């Protein structure tokens, strides 16, 4: 698995949530960072003589994507905003600049919109996995 370094171009498509989903493009987005986490389950007890012991095969894995871009008002950007407000998980396909894709369900845990007078509107979003993620 190779994810790109920060600041790379990508295509983000998010599902409209319908039974036969349509994936809407979130325009003007760039991947600015990512984090893969794995929290293990510790089961150490007094009989372990001070050695740490983990529960085999248990734990919590997650992928967090940090995105930023110019806000262009696309249908995909409005859907991302609506999902951030509602806290709903959504299907997501993030295609990276070398044709690798990240697929899974995500929640928008942060969406920040900024705009100075006479400047473009920008946004930053943090998406966190809400189920299994496939990178291929």
Image: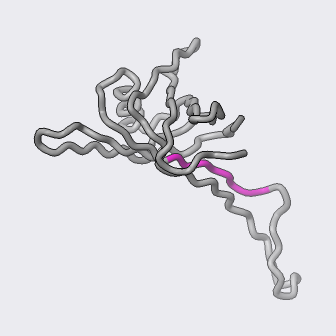
Examine the rendering and report whether any part of residue 52 can be seen: yes
Assign the N terminus to one quadrant of the image: top right
- Whether the magenta-drawn stretch holds residue 60 is answered as yes
Q: Is residue 46 above or below residue 87?
A: below
- Give, as a single range, the part of the protein colored magenta: 58-65
Query: What secondary structure is the stretch in magenta mostly built from?
Result: strand
Q: Is residue 15 left or right of residue 80?
A: right
Residue 66 falls left or right of residue 60? left
Return the x and y of residue 122 as percentages of the image width and height: 29, 40
Q: Quadrant of residue 104?
A: top right
- Residue with the most extreme front position: 98
Name, please, the residue furthest toward the bottom: 49
Rendered position, 86 above or below 66: above
Q: Which residue is pictured at 32% across the width and 36% down the height? A: 70
Q: Quadrant of residue 59?
A: bottom right
Q: Residue at x 87, y 87 (%)?
A: 49
At which x and y percent is residue 53?
83, 73
Pinpoint residue 12: horizontal percent, then vertical percent. 50, 31
Question: Which residue lies at the image location 50% right of the left edge and 27% below the top edge?
Answer: 14
* 81, 34: nearer the viewer: 34
Residue at 39%, 35% in the rendered image: 86
- Is residue 8 a member of the stretch shown in magenta? no
Residue 103 visible, this orientation: no
């Amino acid at each position: 698995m190779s994810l790109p370094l920060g600041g790379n171009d990508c295509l983000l498509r998010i599902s409209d949530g319908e039974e036969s989903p349509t994936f809407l493009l979130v325009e003007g987005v760039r991947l600015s960072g990512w984090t893969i986490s794995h929290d293990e389950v510790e089961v150490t007890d007094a009989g372990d003589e001070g050695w740490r012991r983990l529960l085999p095969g248990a734990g919590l894995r997650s992928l967090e994507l940090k995105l930023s871009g110019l806000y262009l008002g696309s249908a995909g950007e409005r859907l991302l905003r609506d999902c951030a407000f509602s806290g709903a998980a959504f299907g997501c396909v993030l295609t990276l600049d070398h044709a690798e894709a990240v697929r899974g369900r995500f929640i928008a845990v942060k969406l920040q919109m900024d705009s100075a007078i006479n400047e473009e509107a920008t946004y930053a979003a943090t998406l966190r996995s809400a189920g299994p993620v496939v990178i291929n």
